[in-house]
Image (cartoon, rainbow, N blue to C red):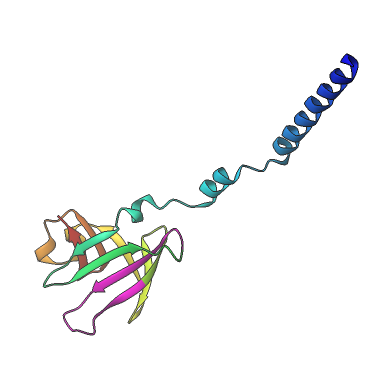
Amino acid sequence: MAKAALVLSTLLLISGCAQNSNTAASGAPDSDASTEQNQPHHPETDQWVGRWTGVEGLFLDISKNEAAGPGHYLLEMQYGLDADQSGTFEGQTTAEGIRFNREGGPQLLRAGDGEATGMKWLLEKEDCLVVATGEGYCRD
């Protein structure tokens, strides 16, 4: 009887080791680690989420586009004084900033300062986002 118990416990020990070595040998990370490793991080552009103010009532609201995934944003903006110069645009992170399409073609939203906006009203600002000279939005 003791011999049978010893054989049984040895078999259990061996089968347990075999399962662990197969998992380790496969090189497959557990699901939590794989999810975290596969999702790119966008720390700079993620910090841009929120409201940015331009001149004369112009604004830019950036939010994450959760449906599209990491690195995708919705840009709600009033970018001109005319009523038709507003809208919500889908953007995506690039090495330079956030790319989006709007009337006039592809645009790039990039970090800058008040001087980069090209507008004297924003000249003293340090934390700004710029689409082009003459179009920028800043935070205080």
Question: In the rendered structure, which segment of residues is drawn in magenta?
Answer: 69-89
Was residue 117 drawn as part of the magenta stretch in this picture?
no
What residue is shown at x 54% (from left), y 51% (from top)? 38
Coordinates of residue 65 in the picture (x, y in percent): 39, 65
Point out the image quarter for the N terminus. top right
In the image, 15 versus 105, the foreground residue is 15
In the image, 45 versus 63, the foreground residue is 63
- Quadrant of the rendered structure where residue 30 is? top right
Coordinates of residue 77 in the picture (x, y in percent): 25, 72
- Quadrant of the rendered structure where residue 90 is? bottom left
Where 36 sits versus 114, above or below? above
Coordinates of residue 87 in the picture (x, y in percent): 28, 78
Relative side of 107 to 40, left or right: left
Q: Total of numbered circles in the picture?
A: 0
Q: Residue furthest front?
A: 1
Point out the image quarter for the C terminus. bottom left
Relative side of 128 to 19, left or right: left
- Quadrant of the rendered structure where residue 98 is? bottom left
In the image, 132 versus 40, the foreground residue is 40
What residue is shown at x 80% (from left), y 27% (from top)? 12
Relative side of 119 to 67, left or right: left
Relative side of 63 to 54, left or right: right
Where 106 sits versus 53, above or below? below
What residue is shown at x 90% (from left), y 16% (from top)? 3
Q: Residue furthest top?
A: 2
Was residue 87 drawn as part of the magenta stretch in this picture?
yes
Coordinates of residue 20 in the picture (x, y in percent): 72, 33
